[in-house]
Image: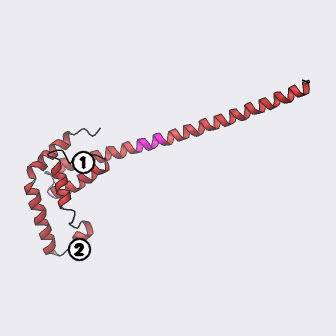
Amino acid sequence: MSTTSYFIALAVCLLLIVASIYFISRQLKLNKQRADRIQAGEQRLQEERAKRVESVRILMQAIEEDDKLTWTEVAIRVKNLLDQLSIDLSEHESVSAIYVIEQNTQHIPTHDQWNELPLKARRKYRDEMDALEAKHLEQLRQAKIDLLAYKFD
């Protein structure tokens, strides 16, 4: 093998090494960016989860202290928050009342639709909600205690 061939082979090998180092470092940088994005996404998910858990606790603490809140409204909100947290407590004896109230009030209009209802229809729905709340009041109070003590981890 001549020295020229040797230097050409050496140059090609060095070029391959430099190109490999470039591509490896580029891939490592991309992997780091991807890992950072994943970590940021997981952090955001944890923060959103913590906000939902805190919302459940706030609603449970406020229910019998705030005259404007009704058990029906709280049950609907808490059930939706539990769904967002992917927690199903419908089999839990006392918490199941929240699911029962939410299920039995799905047909009742909310928000703007509620405001557009005639007074007679609102009164009918209000009576229906009051009857449901009265029927399940003890279970709802126990659900409040259980959810305030529940470990959402």
| Residue 119 visible to an observer of this rendering | yes
Instruction: Identify whether 137 is placed above or below 31.
Output: below
Of residues 73 and 68, the one drawn nearer to the viewer in this rendering: 73
Image quadrant in which you'd find residue 150: top left
Instruction: Verify whether residue 14 appears in magenta.
Output: no
Count neighbours of disc 1 (C-alpha within 10 A) and say few if under 14, some if 14 to 19, many if 20 or more: many
Question: At 8% across and 56% down in the image, what residue appears?
Answer: 135
Tell me, for residue 116, which label it has, or none: 2
- Write down the residue under mark 1: 56
Question: At 15% across and 70% down in the image, what residue appears?
Answer: 122
Secondary structure that dominates the magenta span: helix
Horizontal side of residue 90 vs 39, given as left or right: left
What is the three-letter code of the residue carrying label 1? Answer: Val
* Kind of element beneath mark 1: helix
Image quadrant containing the N terminus: top right
Horizontal side of residue 38 vs 139, given as left or right: right
Instruction: Identify whether 20 is placed above or below 128.
Output: above
Q: Position of residue 105 (x, y in %)?
A: 19, 62
Find the magenta span and give its range. 38-44
Count of marks placed on residues: 2
Instruction: Verify whether residue 39 appears in magenta.
Output: yes
Colouring mode (rainbow / by chain / secondary structure / one colour): secondary structure
Q: Are marks 2 and 1 in contact (CB under 8 Å)?
A: no
Q: Position of residue 38 (x, y in %)?
A: 48, 41
Q: Position of residue 55 (x, y in %)?
A: 27, 48
What is the three-letter code of the residue carrying label 2? Answer: Glu
Of residues 63 and 32, the one drawn nearer to the viewer in this rendering: 32
